[in-house]
């Protein structure tokens, strides 16, 4: 079975006890494992696939909590390194009535930024493995170059690259630096997941169709275009597919995009035979699966805690949004 490696940040999400309250007015929080790459690794593991997290954690109670939480879900944590030179990244979350959220990050610096390229080993990867990453860890820091080495290493071994820009502008000094960095990494990737809100920012193109087509550069083979409650699309150079949203009672959208990515990667690479065997029929099945997995996650609080098992997804009878 191929393994999905997720590289980048793992952090603590402090989830608010109140909903529909501005962050400054929230009186209680509780901690949960967070960080988009870590979430994707957990999604794969909860579905029954093999996944691993590559990153650096702080030798503090929060870092220990992250490692334990990953292990409890079934993620391979043997690729994690530790440091006492920085603390764990924290994210305080406020939830709107519709389940959408705002973040306030504490990360200057944090342990995840200190992962160095010499800590990445080329013999970790084998043919058919997948490396997933996001843009939060591409700021000018050692971890950016660790990503570059990991990408080069897995490509040399015949692996697949998955990239979710997952734009978080408060973590960048300049928005244009964020955009240009994302554009540098897109051509290195086989699969791009991009949201409706991110597309015009990243591409600089307002027209949706032209913007999506502009992403087919370098190694890009598949674009996953997510539209929240309105569903999702899958674009290749040869065909495009669409699925409607799933009607659910949304409580918290934290981690929904990561659930989508994890669901898609699981269906294509763990349950399927990869991109070489991806017919339109199989691509549609993967898109529908990822869409449902993400929708169900919004009915529960937090990220990893909201991810379903395979049995729960198969039992779910959702109604499509027309």
Image (cartoon, rainbow, N blue to C red):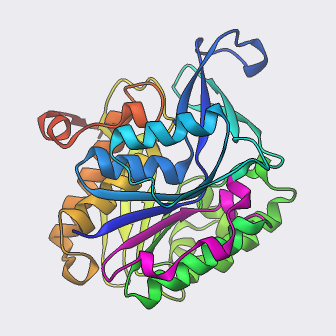
Query: Image quadrant of residue 296?
Result: top left
Would residue 168 be counted in the magenta stretch? no
Which of the image's four quarters has the N terminus? bottom left
Residue 82 visible in rendering: yes
Residue 192 pos. (x, y %): 48, 69
Q: Is residue 279 above or below residue 193?
A: below
Residue 251 pos. (x, y %): 45, 23
Q: Residue at x 54, y 66 (%)?
A: 208
Q: Is residue 282 above or below residue 100?
A: below
Q: Residue at x 60, y 80 (%)?
A: 149
Q: Residue at x 67, y 56 (%)?
A: 136
Query: Magenta residues?
Result: 112-140
Of 198 and 9, nearer the camera is 9
Q: Is residue 252 left or right of residue 308?
A: right
Query: Image quadrant of residue 179?
Result: bottom right
Exactly how many numbered labels are in the figure? 0
Q: Is residue 150 left or right of residue 304?
A: right
Q: Residue at x 55, y 19 (%)?
A: 97
Which of the image's four quarters has the C terminus? top left
Residue 120 pos. (x, y %): 57, 73
Of 171 and 90, nearer the camera is 90
Residue 157 pos. (x, y %): 40, 87
Q: Is residue 7 left or right of residue 232?
A: right
Query: Image quadrant of residue 176?
Result: bottom right
Of 238 and 304, nearer the camera is 304
Residue 215 visible in rendering: no
Q: Is residue 303 above or below residue 236?
A: above
Would residue 138 be counted in the magenta stretch? yes
Most distant residue in the right direction: 173
Of 10 and 253, nearer the camera is 10
């Amino acid at each position: 079975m191929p393994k999905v490696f997720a590289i980048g940040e793992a952090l603590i999400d402090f989830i608010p006890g109140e909903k529909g309250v501005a962050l400054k007015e929230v009186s209680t929080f509780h901690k949960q494992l967070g960080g988009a790459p870590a979430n994707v690794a957990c999604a794969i593991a909860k579905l029954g696939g093999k996944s691993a997290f590559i990153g650096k954690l702080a030798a503090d109670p929060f870092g220990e909590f992250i490692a334990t939480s990953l292990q409890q879900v079934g993620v391979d944590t043997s690729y994690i390194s530790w440091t006492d030179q920085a603390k764990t990244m924290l994210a305080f979350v406020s939830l709107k009535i519709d389940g959408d959220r705002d973040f306030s990050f504490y990360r200057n610096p944090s342990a995840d930024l200190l992962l160095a390229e010499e800590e990445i080993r080329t013999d970790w990867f084998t043919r058919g493995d997948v490396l997933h990453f996001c843009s939060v860890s591409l700021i000018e820091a050692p971890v950016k170059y660790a990503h570059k080495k990991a990408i080069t290493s897995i490509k040399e071994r015949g692996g697949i690259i998955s990239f979710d820009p997952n734009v978080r502008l408060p973590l960048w000094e300049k928005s244009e630096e964020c955009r240009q960095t994302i554009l540098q990494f897109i051509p290195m990737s086989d699969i791009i997941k991009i949201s409706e809100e991110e597309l015009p920012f990243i591409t600089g193109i307002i027209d949706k169709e032209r913007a999506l087509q502009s992403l087919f550069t370098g190694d890009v083979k598949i674009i996953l275009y997510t539209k929240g409650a309105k569903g999702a699309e899958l674009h290749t150079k040869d065909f495009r597919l669409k699925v409607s949203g799933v009607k659910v009672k949304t409580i918290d959208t934290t981690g929904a995009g990561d659930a989508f990515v994890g669901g898609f990667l699981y269906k294509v690479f763990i349950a399927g035979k990869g991109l070489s065997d991806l017919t339109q029929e199989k691509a549609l099945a993967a898109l529908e699966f990822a869409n449902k997995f993400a929708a169900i996650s919004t009915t529960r609080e937090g990220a990893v805690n909201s991810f379903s098992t395979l049995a729960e997804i198969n039992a779910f009878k959702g109604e499509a949004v027309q």
